[in-house]
Image (cartoon, grey):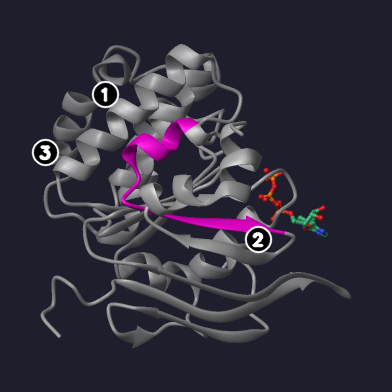
Amino acid sequence: MPSDTMPLLVASGVDAGYGTMQVLWGVDLDVRPGETVLLLGANGAGKTTFLKSLVGLIDARQGSIRLGGDDITQMRSSDRMRRGMTYMSELAVFPDLSIEENIRIGAQALGHANPNRRLDELYGLFPVLRDKRRDAASTLSGGQRKMLGMAKAMAAEPKLLVLDEPSAGLSPLFVKEVIRILRDLQGRGIALLVAEQNIGFLEVATRVFVLEGGRIRFSGTVAEMSDNEALRRAYFGLK
Ligand code: ATP
């Protein structure tokens, strides 16, 4: 298989949960290099649980996770990050640290040869952060914090950026700004896996996986999703 069509990430049959509660049931999902996959699901569907199992913050109880062809199911989180998968959680930043300190922490895994050049590149992408770089992250607005979360994740130079609800808590205007940034990252060839309940993110997705009650109910292109009457009704509010 040519390397550009070989999946970058493949999760197969992933079960996960907390204590005696099983949350995920046999979840299959893949992301190809440079593509944007949307994991769509309501509150409590298990999106965060799945992303955490991908990045190694909780264990997959069954199934396997492969990154770049290698089995990473048992690998610790920091090693998965070194292999090119970075996670942006819903909270994402350390509020007491300055903006620049947050970004430097994001780059730590790399032992970057020239961290200042990397900072300059990131400030180019998020100019508002340059102006405030010495301020504590807690002084940022919700939208700006989200940008800092993305800058921090990008500092690790991921091949695959995994984003947990980047729209959470943001006004529609900032959601548009986040979508603009995701487009910019797409243009740089970075693969994105975005967990969301906001269907606005369909406009940047190449493929969609719908998670309901911890199971994948649908996977396909956005066009295939809108051809599916039940999904159309559930997610687009259309008859
Ligand atoms: P949200 O949009 O609310 O984040 P989600 O799709 O990301 O939803 P999860 O956060 O993965 O869903 O939650 C799935 C289920 O797991 C829910 O029933 C939730 O209450 C439960 N859960 C999540 N985290 C924990 C935890 N640390 N301990 C126990 N149960 C948890």
Q: Which residues are magenta?
A: 200-212
Q: Residue at x 52, y 40 (%)?
A: 92
Closer to the camera, 21 or 75? 21
Kindly identify which numbered label has been placed on residue 49: 2
Residue behind mark 3? 117
**Which numbered disc, 1 or 2, marks the residue that appears first in the sequence?**
2
What amino acid is at disc 1?
Answer: Phe
Which is more foreground, mark 3 or mark 2? 2
Is the C-beta of the residue carrying label 3 under 8 Å from the nearest atom of ligand 1? no
Q: Which residue is mark 1?
A: 126
Q: Name the residue rendered at 27%, 66% in the picture.
A: 32
Decide: marks 1, 3 in contact (CB < 8 A)?
A: no
Is residue 206 located in the magenta-colored stretch of the structure?
Answer: yes
* Direction from residue 84 to residue 119 in the image, left or right: left
The residue that appears at 74% across and 60% down in the rendered structure is 213
In the picture provided, is 192 more to the left or to the right than 78?
left
Label 2: how many Cα within 10 Å (few below 14, some 14–19, many 20+): many
Q: Are marks 1 and 2 in contact (CB under 8 Å)?
A: no
Of the residues tagged 1 and 3, which is closer to the observer?
A: 1
N-terminal of the pair, mark 3 or mark 2, is: 2
Query: In which quadrant is the N terminus drawn?
Result: bottom left
Quadrant the C terminus occupies: top right
Q: Does the beta carbon at disc 2 come under 8 Å from ligand 1?
A: yes
The extreme front residue here reads 239
Task: Tell me the amino acid under the disc marked 2.
Answer: Thr
Disc 1, SS? loop
- Reply above or below: 165 against 24: above
